[in-house]
Amino acid sequence: MKSILKEGETCWRIAKADRLSIIIDAADFFRHAKSAMSKARRSIYLVGWDFDTRIDLIPGNGDDRKKKDQLPDQLGKFLNALAERNEDLDIRILKWDIGLLNSITRGETPFYILKWMFDKRIHLKLDGAHPSISSHHMKLLVIDDQVAFCGGIDMTVGRWDTRDHTDKEPLRKSPMGFAQGPWHDATTCLSGEAAKALGEVARNRWRLATGEDLSPEAASGDETPWPEELEVGFRDISIGIARTAPEYDERKQIVEIETAKLAIIAAVKKTLYVESQYFASRRIAEAMAERLKEPDGPEIVLINPEGCEGYLEAKAMDSARIRLMKLVQDADIHDRFRLYYPVNAARTPIYVHAKMMFADDRIVKIGSANLNNRSMGYDTECDLILEASEGQALLTEKIIATRNDLMAEHLGREVSEVSEAIAAHGGSIIKAIEALNGKSGRGLVAVPMRELTADEELIAESDIADPERPAGVRYRTSSFLRQRFGRHGKRVGNAAAGQS
């Protein structure tokens, strides 16, 4: 069994995590993040695409707050309360500079933004160290260099939801009181050496954006700020930390995530289960197509939203998805590819913002990177890769259980039903989904194939909305793929390089 992890190729660093949990949907993430930050003694780093100081971390907490932790739920007030309670606490917030426009246009008060930009304890900086129209997309929260969250959930409007994704959920609303649609997302929480390494990622980002070097602020003592109610999913495991960063000034491009995704596609044997906001990377689609052509290749199930948000994004990304669907379906001569979007009990589409890959029973990748061009070489991203080695039976069981739990959520079933259906169909997740999927209530709906209009064809050919790399920067196929994965790596590598 060949590992996909190699420092300098598919990841920046391999580090030990003494605890790791995968957190599904923002209701749990916000609650656990508040718990962990409440225990911070030395430092809190918040690095992300967007933050909204008006959101409640625990909506509906209301009067019960005084009985629980005496700390406000609104993000801005909460961080201020932490700073007032502990004068030694250093809070650093790094926000994408163009994201500031989102804050202003949606009505967010400038009070916190202006105050924190000149505050001595809460330091807010806008990150402009990127090529034009590039996005700082990674989402990190690091507490005392001891506990870290890394995934796809932003602390902003429209993210909070429970795993039920019920229609007309009264707590799922914007700070202005407007109803928000169902939203599916995912992140991780981990502790140990890997958390400290993510603290280094955050400090590196801070230095590039501000020119200021931060020293590690690890708290001493045995007690760590692990969230009180968060059950530990995995213990004492090695984690690969993978990044994307565009070439900028003296920094060379970083394509660890892209190489890791191609390595996962090359390595998978039976089942590849993927959740992503987009399906727009031709290189990834071609790599999948090569594996689907094989008589003994894997099944591939991809979960997307029904469509993208916003007119231009929908036109560009949905058009690209249709083109790549056709490419993959044409290669799917053995009928092993499915592309679905989830619906809730009222058959309302659930927006998928999660970014995860599960390969067989041995690999999980989760983070901020989508299956689109930007996530491969134009935006900044951070993913975690968990890989089981041969003989780690407990770890492989937990990986499968986590994947089946996600499938059960989308199908409105018990995890045991999903596990039994997969076993009954010889390990096929496609046949299990088809057996459990209903035409009413919670379920998965196939993304329909259609012809593109003339203007959609033009947009799909353009890279304005989804550029792959800054102008003049080329993609170079990693020789690691061919060397490590034999014929599968060669086929995927050739597809990545645009060769037949």
Image (cartoon, rainbow, N blue to C red):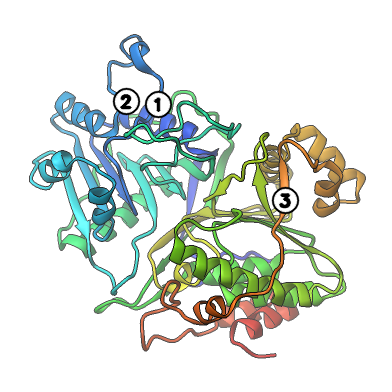
Can residue 253 be seen in this snapshot?
Answer: yes
Left of 329 or right of it: where is 138?
A: left
Q: Tell which of 162 and 17 is nearer to you.
A: 162
Across and down, in percent, residue 173 comes to 42, 33
Across and down, in percent, residue 198 comes to 38, 51
Q: Residues within 10 Å of mark 1 (few under 14, many from 20)?
A: many
Q: Quadrant of the C terminus?
A: bottom right
| Distance Cα–Cα, label 3 vs label 2 | 36 Å
Tag 2–tag 1 contact (CB < 8 Å): yes
Q: Quadrant of the N terminus?
A: bottom right
Position above or below: 25 against 457 = above
Q: Tell which of 291 and 305 is nearer to you.
A: 305
Type of the residue with mark 1: Ile
Residue, disc 3: 445
Residue, disc 2: 73
Q: Secondary structure at mark 3?
A: strand
| Distance Cα–Cα, label 3 vs label 1 | 31 Å
Residue, disc 1: 58
Residue occupying the point 24% across, 78% down: 249
